[in-house]
Amino acid sequence: MTLAAAILAVLLALIFLALGTAKILILPRLREVATEAGFSVAGYLALHSGSAR
């Protein structure tokens, strides 16, 4: 593996790590908002994203 490939692999891993961490950290707030709106989390996400899941 070349140095450039290793750097790109690490960068990609860090991006996915950041996105995964953000998704985990937002869950409590998402549950709270969904409950206040009278939906399950899945129902709120489907409504919020504009797609039927």
Image (cartoon, helix red, strand yellow):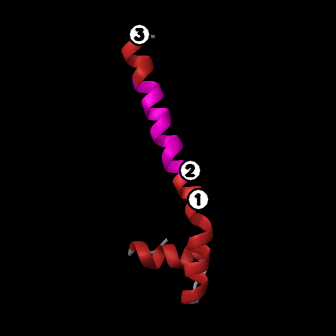
Q: Is residue 12 above or below residue 29?
A: above
Q: Mark 1 or 3 closer to N-term?
A: 3
Q: Which mark identifies residue 21?
A: 2
Residue 42 part of the magenta-drawn span: no
* Residue 8 lies in quadrant: top left
Q: Nearer the viewer, residue 17 or 38?
A: 17
Q: Nearer the viewer, residue 52 or 17?
A: 17
* Residue 25 lies in quadrant: bottom right
Q: Residue at x 47, y 74 (%)?
A: 46
Disc 1 element: helix
Q: Amino acid at mark 3?
A: Thr
Q: Residue at x 55, y 63 (%)?
A: 26
Q: Which residues are magenta?
A: 8-21
Mark 1 and mark 2 residues within 8 Å of each other at the beta carbon: yes
Mark 1 and mark 3 residues within 8 Å of each other at the beta carbon: no
Name the residue beneath numbered marker 3.
2
Q: Does residue 18 appear in the picture of this structure?
A: yes
